[in-house]
Amino acid sequence: MTSKPGLIVVAILVVCTSVSVFAQRPSKTKTAQSIAAIKTVMDAQRDAWNRGDIEGYMDGYDRSDKTVFVSGDNVTRGWQTVLDRYKKSYDTREKMGVLTFSDLEITLLGADSAKVLGRWSLKRANDEPHGRFTLIFKRTSKGWRIVHDHTS
């Protein structure tokens, strides 16, 4: 009988890769807990916004210089810069209106990261702007936080 070392190496690689990928997948319980925690962050953001509390809304974002917000053709980098942008754009309660999120699709990308796709809308006295967003959440020492926000 001839040995086939190449096949043995391939088999070992397949087994090791499968074990590695399986080990990185969060359990169903952990997935449910992560999704619930992300929804809690978004609910807190909505509630803060609807109280007129932009700083409270920004608690959902990672307080990092690497935090990114994309809207239209503009890219804003850094938590403080994103906060300043919100304060400038929404400097009155009338401009802030009442925020709602809907059609949320939360997908864990790993144990410590997730993607959220959804819709946003503002109800204001004279208009109702709305659009879509994609958020990248990361589990940080402060809990789940947005590190990348692409809103249209």
Image (cartoon, helix red, strand yellow):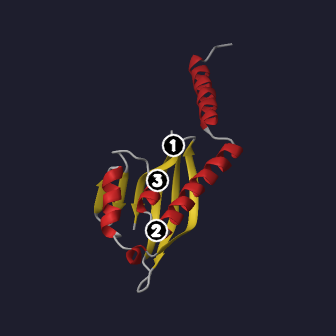
| Residue 58 position (above or below residue 34) | below
Look at mark 3 in the image and give the residue it sits on: 59
Residues marked 1 and 3 touching at CB (< 8 Å): no
Mark 3 or 2: in front is: 3
Res 71 visible: no
Which residue is at a point 31% across and 62% down the rendered structure image?
Answer: 85
Q: Residues within 10 Å of mark 1 (few under 14, many from 20)?
A: few
Circle number at residue 118: none
- Between 73 and 123, the one nearer to me in the picture: 123
Look at mark 1 in the image and give the residue it sits on: 142
Mark 2 and mark 1: Cα distance apart in space: 26 Å
Res 114 visible: yes
Q: Position of residue 104 (x, y in %)?
A: 57, 63
Q: Position of residue 103 (x, y in %)?
A: 57, 68
Q: Position of residue 2 (x, y in %)?
A: 64, 13
Mark 3 and mark 2: Cα distance apart in space: 20 Å
* Quadrant containing the N terminus in the rendered view: top right
- Between 91 and 45, the one nearer to me in the picture: 91
* Mark with earlier residue (3, 2): 3
The number of callouts visible is 3
Mark 1 and mark 3: Cα distance apart in space: 10 Å
* Mark with earlier residue (2, 1): 2
Amino acid type of the residue that numbered disc 3 sits on in the rendered structure: Asp
Amino acid type of the residue that numbered disc 2 sits on in the rendered structure: Arg
Which residue is at a point 63% across and 28% down the rendered structure image?
Answer: 15
| Residue 74 position (above or below residue 111) | below
Most extreme residue toward the bottom, as rendered?
A: 126
Amino acid type of the residue that numbered disc 1 sits on in the rendered structure: Lys
Q: Residues within 10 Å of mark 3 (few under 14, many from 20)?
A: some
Look at mark 2 in the image and give the residue it sits on: 132
Q: Position of residue 41 (x, y in %)?
A: 55, 55
